[in-house]
Amino acid sequence: MILLLGRRLLLMVPILLVVSFLVFGLVVAVPGDPAITLAGDNATPERIAEIRGQLGLDDPLAQQYGRWVGGVVQGDLGASLFSGRPVATSIAERMPVTIGLATLSMIVALLISIPAGIIAATKRGRWPDRVATFLASAGLAMPSFFLGLVLVLVFSLQLGWLPATGYVPFEVDPVLWLKHMILPAITLGAAAAAETTRQLRSSLSDVLQQDYIRTARAKGTRAGSVIVHHALKNAAVPVVTVLGFQVAFLLGGSVIVEQIFALPGLGGLAIRAVIDRDIPVIQGVVVFAAVLVMVVNLAVDLLYGWLNPKIRTA
Amino acid sequence: MTAIAAPATLALDVEDLSVEFVADRRWVRVVDGVSFSVRRGETLAVVGESGSGKSVTNLAVMGLINAPQGRITSGRVLLEGTDLRALERRALEDVRGNRIAMVFQEPMTSLNPAYRVGDQIAEVVRRHRGVSRSAARARAVEALDHVGIPQASSRARAYPHEFSGGMRQRVMIAMAIACEPAVLVADEPTTALDVTIQAQALDLLRQMRDDLGMALVFITHDLAVVADIADRVMVMYGGQAVETAEVHELFAHPRHPYTEGLMRSMPQVGLRGRRLASIPGQPPRPTALPPGCRFAPRCPYALPKCDVPPPLVDVVPGHATRCVRADELVLRGPR
Ligand SMILES: Nc1ncnc2c1ncn2[C@@H]1O[C@H](COP(=O)(O)OP(=O)(O)OP(=O)(O)O)[C@@H](O)[C@H]1O
Ligand SMILES: [Mg+2]
């Protein structure tokens, strides 16, 4: 297990390097000169040159890259070209919103997909399976902005049960936080729920055909325990394998969902930064997202090792 | 003579068991009116070619035929006097693994890859004995030790993939005997193993039967193994029992041409290199059974009167055959 962890951590180094190249490449690839933007209208060429000097934009690329990576490693992501605020501070402020949303979406997805997948797999071909499969296809086909609007229409405007927009930090009022987050989380989690249901259905019906399930039944194990204890752990292996991708998708989707529900998360920060060509902020958000996805994948790998003893003891 | 066995002495008494599966969108009978019984301490061998219904018969006894693809259409399964088919699902679960247990044909895939073998054995003990976790663990180690797994207490913490096929079969046997059942069904427990291991597994089963006084139902298609382990034999063909007899009687005086065919295709010690007279042709598929005697198309003695389905009748007490020519034919045992 320790060995597995070490191997995975080592594997992260080259990936991080590639990410850093790509992110730094933004500076070169994005058209326009941030110094010109920053200098504002009617700036003299001297003023622009001065700003370029301040930003170090005239140094060789390798030197700029080294400086940037050096900062990132120490947690210094630079400062916004416009507000001058440290990027790390902006991210730290907005991170709880996005991570909270992604976590809650994942929980929603699992709460829906585990029972739905079990029902679909055990009643394969019968009506509960058909209903679950239909809903899963619908969940996958439905764009999140559409689902979000429908939910707002029904639960906020019609029924008035939940607020349509806005945010209350968890530490201020957990109940209000949940009230504000539940619709966004369902909106964001629906696709993940649908995808996970589909995968769980197929892997669980596969596992239920296995000889060791027959052994469990022959032992007199209770029918429910056969599924929960003997089948689910094995069926989870392929599902967990793609959980890492799901998290990446959730992070991507959160950009849209945060806009719909006016949540002050990283999505809004990223969109603002892209519109403004605020390159340090864009870089910071991308690096942060990349590290987050990698950490999640690491956790997934460890979970995978726990589920699958062959990997652990190999 | 009408031998009336006191029901209490029979550990397992199966009567007129029939099983059907869905094939080509209709129900096809795969096991057809099979009856047999075993006493404690006794071994019944169930013999027949691949596809003759040996496994399905015993899965049906265990209540392991799954809807919607399969169903039991008739029969009574008395385990120590209790009709298993009349039991509620939960009551049947209380019996399985406890009073009757089964060792499956596929040792490599019958253990759950996600759990330690000791825990898998402890599970059945906890389920039926309701003992503490640690007592169940101790019982698991004891069972592993009983089936001859060296360093049982440390091996109990290993996962199935860390065991060879022969050792996995021992684990399966340990799991099956952990609650000391009255009946153990062993479905070709040696077929998947290599020859030296086969003999060990056979010895082990015999020893377990004697140690625990179990009734053993031993499924095989190998008559040499039958001679070695069985007290009585049921020969199956095309989903039916075609001959049942005490083992010495069967080998000395086979009364069904199919049994003779099986015996004549047995490999002989000291006759290596000689071609085996295997039965020509293929066993029938359940979807395309001959209208009369199911063996007739392959039978060297078949006559027109074999076009009528023959009943299973006693030729001598305790020796039954499903052949209308049983009285006229003189069949030979192994050469
Ligand atoms: N789940 C199933 N669905 C449909 N048909 C089945 C199923 N299980 C078994 N059968 C059919 O039932 C018949 C008897 O099979 P069974 O497994 O009992 O044979 P067997 O005597 O155990 O053979 P072997 O020596 O190969 O194990 C075969 O024709 C098989 O195709
Ligand atoms: Mg079989």
Image: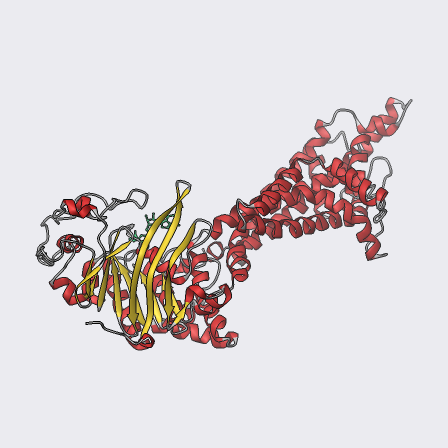
Would you say B196 lies left or right of B257 here? Answer: right
Front position in the image: B159 or A226 = A226
Looking at the picture, does residue B300 appear above or below residue A232? above
Seen as rendered, the residue at the extreme right is: A42
Find residue A10 and report its horizontal and vertical position in percent. 56, 49
Q: Is residue A156 visible?
A: yes
Would you say A47 lies left or right of B241 here? Answer: right
Would you say A219 lies left or right of B29 here? Answer: right
Front position in the image: B162 or A298 = B162
Looking at the picture, does residue B272 appear above or below residue B151? above
Location of the C terminus of chain B (image quadrant): bottom left
Instruction: Write down the quadrant of residue A31 in the picture.
Output: top right
Q: Is residue A242 visible?
A: no
Look at 80% across and 38% down and name the residue there: A259
Find residue B198 and report its horizontal and vertical position in percent. 25, 61
Find residue B270 and report its horizontal and vertical position in percent. 8, 58
Front position in the image: A279 or A153 = A153
Would you say B3 lies left or right of A6 here? Answer: left
Look at 75% across and 35% down and name the residue there: A146
Looking at the picture, does residue A306 appear above or below residue B101? above
